[in-house]
Image (tube, coloured by chain):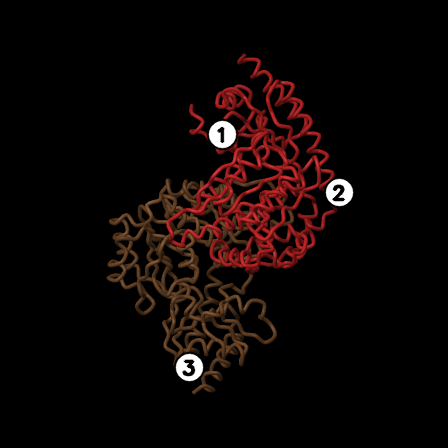
Chain colours: A red, B brown
Amino acid sequence: MNAGSFSPSMFIGVEGKGVISFGSGQPDLPPPKQVFDMLPSFKAFKYGLIQGQVNLRRALARQYPRSTAKSFVVTNGASEALDLTLRVLSEHGSGNGKKRKVLLPRPYYYSYPFNVKYAGMEPVYTKLVEGRIDFDDFASKVHDCTAVIINSPSNPTGRVESISTLRKIEKLASDLGVFVISDEVYKDLIYVRENYLIKGPHVVTINSFSKTFAMCGFRVGYLWSLDNEFVKAVIEMKTHSSMNTNILGQEMAYEATKVPRSFIDDQLKIWKERRDLIYEGLSDLGLDLWKPEGAFYVLPKVEKPVDFVLGVFKRYKVITYMGEWFGADERVRFSYALDSEKIEEGLKRVARFLEGRK
Amino acid sequence: MNAGSFSPSMFIGVEGKGVISFGSGQPDLPPPKQVFDMLPSFKAFKYGLIQGQVNLRRALARQYPRSTAKSFVVTNGASEALDLTLRVLSEHGSGNGKKRKVLLPRPYYYSYPFNVKYAGMEPVYTKLVEGRIDFDDFASKVHDCTAVIINSPSNPTGRVESISTLRKIEKLASDLGVFVISDEVYKDLIYVRENYLIKGPHVVTINSFSKTFAMCGFRVGYLWSLDNEFVKAVIEMKTHSSMNTNILGQEMAYEATKVPRSFIDDQLKIWKERRDLIYEGLSDLGLDLWKPEGAFYVLPKVEKPVDFVLGVFKRYKVITYMGEWFGADERVRFSYALDSEKIEEGLKRVARFLEGRK
């Protein structure tokens, strides 16, 4: 069986029945209860504003510097925010025939190359070193790009970029007039420092309620930009491509903005314990891996990754994802969005598998 | 003031305060109460299947011939269904440089030309005669198109295509291998006959819960196709562009599928009364118009449409939409999604305006 012939979808619906899944990037802890409390009284049904509901955008504006409700567009998850951003930047209708380029650090979130191609653009890559951006390589490749996607903390690497690197990127992108698309959906899940919000004239920050508040299924994301023309172009496109984001999802997200910070801090403690557990466990197995600094993924090197992923699944009911799906051919991705007992049990099974193929 | 300098967005937020709006295509009657009944007990939060929830797709499969749950993709409204369909058909990444064409009957729903261009394709037009497709003109233009969009009942014309025309289109499209995208969001609002479901090897039917069940704000639409490869390609794209449609909206839509047919019949009676009222009213004012046969729009010719739309708004607080936005330069669109009293009051004001500019 070749790696190209299977994909994350092969694991859908096989959870339960003794399966330990390090697969999906879905928080297992539930959302704050407040997001459900408003449901019984909800009665609205008409179209909402394409840009998003005013109460939600005003609440977001209080979280971002120099912002008003006009700086945001609420979207069907971070996915749609990214999709619209790239489509607006691509101008594939311009007819000059030459595809615009978007720079992606590799390993990357598995949708990025698809998003870039679907927008009629071409992905180019800068290779991460120790899971982080190598600024010299970045600088050598960004000059003829329309945009770059930064994803810190990163899915799949779990790494957080240094602030000095992010500042150099801000400066260079600004000098070159390149758009910086900063996917910060894991901004509240950082173990090593506070999040650093990338700033600049053509910065588009993408975020979501999915990871911070475990609201994946409700698909409420947003983009933030101080580039008014860009925001207007996104709204114009969304008017035709999907109209408003689900009005009930937006109300639930608005409730989430009122949840005390302690909710996030409490979750972060749990994630950090899990991070320590899996990092130490995989290190003890002798695997070569980067220490996760944010998000909930770890991306160890393994020998014969196809054999590994299929073997631990078929023989030990453990789901892991091919690093290849994320541009990391020699690695496999573990999501640690599951409780400590399951992580420990999963690690034991992986140990048995590795022992067995020595 | 030039027609190009205003758009439907100028009317947003000005409703109320004595305003009569024939603008938005938003049903004013509420959804069936059953769709809200399940809210208090809803507790799910995880990602759903990209293709859509199984219970909803199974319920839809009972409404479409020769279908299973596999024949559907649940989307963020009909808008996203159309957007994904066109993007999948465009292959603008194929690099042959030549844009594919999509045939649109004109007047058209105002998003269609944008949707086609955003997908990297080129709209071409066949002119409606008496608000209906002229098959000879259609046939002369469809041969080098990748797809055609059929919208019967039509927004903005209110017209329903004859079954014989639809059958000729089925045959020709099938012979030529052209995709037929049939936007049937008004299929349950037809005053003249039952809906005719277009069939064929490359038919994509687009529908929604927005108009039949007044669920616009929840953005639950879907596409149906018996072309399995096409359905798979849509799912693949949606995996990256927006992931699952809001899980709660889908549950509400599922509840709507269980509502007795009498709900739709009762609504249809109301719509038909309104249709009669506005058709007779505008005819009595001497306007040249097509009798609406479905949906809830009427598209009369008026002299100096810019002057008309701005005049009735500024002097009589009546909102109408420029026909130009729908490819009908000499006309204006009235939506009659408002109660009879308001329709009568609006007609009186329009009469006064027309009297005043004689």
Please give the residue where the numbered disc 2 appears in the rendered image: A262
Q: Is residue B353 above or below residue A321?
A: below
Quarter of the picture containing the C terminus of chain B is bottom left
Disc 1: which residue: A324
State the SS at label 2.
helix
Q: Is residue B100 depicted above or below B353 in this figure?
A: above
Is B20 located above or below residue A134 in the figure?
below
- Judge the density around disc 2: few (<14), some (14-19), many (≥20) Cα neighbours within 10 Å: few
Q: Nearer the viewer, residue B105 or B158?
A: B105
Q: Is residue B175 left or right of residue B37?
A: left
In the rendered structure, the answer to whether residue A344 lies left or right of residue B139 reads right
Q: Are marks 2 and 1 on the same chain?
A: yes
Disc 3 secondary structure class: loop
How far is mark 2 from mark 3, CA to CA?
65 Å
Q: Nearer the viewer, mark 3 or mark 1?
A: 1
Can you tell which of label 2 and label 1 is closer to the viewer? Answer: 1
Identified by mark 3, the residue type is Leu
In the picture of the structure, the residue carrying the numbered disc 3 is B285
**Circle 1 — which element?**
helix
> Which amino acid type is marked by label 2?
Ser
**Residue B110 seen in this snapshot:** yes
- Comparing A143 with A156, the one in front is A143
**What is the x, y in percent for residue B38?**
60, 49
Discs 2 and 3 carry the same chain letter: no
Q: How many marks?
A: 3
Parent chain of label 2 = A
Q: Nearer the viewer, mark 2 or mark 3?
A: 2
For badge 1, the amino acid type reads: Glu
Per the model, the C-alpha gap separating discs 3 and 1 is: 68 Å
